Amino acid sequence: MKQKMPTKRVKHYSIIVTLTVLLSLLLAAMGRSGLEGAVIYIITDVVFLSVVLYMLESSRLDAKLGSSRADHYGRIADWYGILCAAVFAFSFVPEFFYPAAAAALFLAMVSNAEIAITLNVFLCMLLCIAKGANFFAFASFCVQILIGAQLAKTMREKEMRPWGCVLLLSVSVCIPTLFDYLTYWKGNMSLIFTNFVLGAAAVLLYMLLADRVYDRKNQDDIGVYEKIIDEDYPYVVDIKRYSRVEYIRAVRAATICAKCAALIGANEPVASAAGFYYRLGLLEGDPVVENGVRLAQEGCFPEAVIEILAEYNGEKKLPSTRESAIVHMVDCCINKIEMLNRQNLSTDWNQDMVIYQTLNELSGTGIYDESGLSMNQFLKVREFLVCEETEYDNTAGRRDNGAV
């Protein structure tokens, strides 16, 4: 069934379009370029907006925005509006004064690096057109934008923020000063002082907002993972209809994966959701890996979960994260215990020995070498899985399944 775009998302996209056109018309009027200038601005807007709206929808479908909730797009529209106002304000001062690095950092905080770079490059291009700026001004903006967008990635980690703030301040002062010198071949103490003040203000604002923005974004991320394993979620309902046994197994796998992730400090929501959907491709049969990935993409699953499904059983790719390694270990252990149950050989001693043997053999093959799972973490997970009661009562599930 084709999904209709929610009204709120349409509204937020419309706000972005309106702000872009309004800014262009204001800059055209300020430059007294007449009707022809306004037409040039609008044509540029059409091309740009086509790219940006495509990127927003593409990022949503690929789950690269962290959340598909309407308020998430509202925050992007809000910050874009702030940047449009800033560009218009800075159109009245020399071109090298615009804090492009900080602008990219703040927008990347609520979207992603790709969208932040695209939006900011376009806004800086409008600013340069309005001011008749030369190549060096635009190059200065582009360098700052690239650095600012990348800083947003590393500064999600709290311990990296002080270093990131120092780098942001340095970039805000040094890059414009360098390109201003290349343009005019003389120093500009006023530019250095002003950009230092602007950079310091951006650092202060970032420190005030960072915890709130990132915590809210993390809550959005967690909410997405919780949503896709909720009992009423369409794919969960499909798994129940496919097989009650498979549903019970998925729930058990999700629970164990989350516990293992918590044990070694890995991402619990990712491990839990991936553990639940690890065998999603079985719903449509061979090729299991491709079908699982396709279904996850159609369901707009988070990228981290899709990647783990693409690494199912190590068939196409080896586990590349600790969460993927955990899900693989749990799935293999449950498979082995199910086999013992079918052969009526299941005892506590047999289960322990089988889990030890299974995980040791897997580790010996090097399947987890690219996952970032250390030997100490592997041993912790192995001991937990040995102690964990991985057997579950699925006789009711078999009866239900037989009735399907």
Image: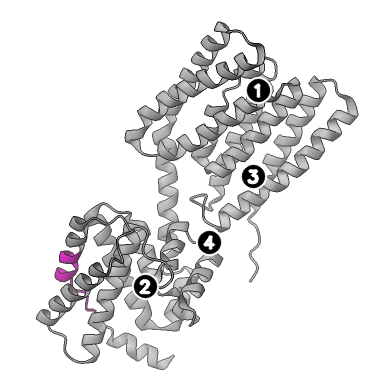
Question: Does residue 151 appear to the left or right of 23 in the view shown?
Answer: left
Taking 52 as reference, is 84 above or below it?
above
Taking 34 as reference, is 341 above or below it?
below
Could you say where residue 199 lies in the image, as x and y percent from the top left? 49, 20
Q: Element under label 2?
A: helix
> Which one is in front in this view, the residue at disc 3 or the one at disc 1?
1
- Name the amino acid type tagged 3: His
> Which one is in front in this view, the residue at disc 4 or the one at disc 3?
4
Please give the label number shown on residue 313: 2
> Which one is in front in this view, the residue at disc 3 or the one at disc 2?
2
Q: Which residue is mark 3?
A: 12
**Residue 393 shows in the view:** no
Tag count? 4
The residues bearing labels 1 and 4 have C-alpha atoms spaced at a distance of: 40 Å
Q: Residue furthest left?
A: 349
Tell me which segment is drawn in magenta.
382-392
The residues bearing labels 4 and 2 have C-alpha atoms spaced at a distance of: 22 Å
Q: Earlier in the sequence, mark 4 or mark 2?
A: 4
Q: Residue at x 42, y 79 (%)?
A: 240
- Name the amino acid type tagged 2: Asn
Contact between labelled residues 3 and 4, with CB atoms less than 8 Å apart: no
Q: Which residue is mark 1?
A: 137
- Name the amino acid type tagged 4: Cys
Give the quarter of the image for residue 23: top right
Q: Which residue is mark 4?
A: 300
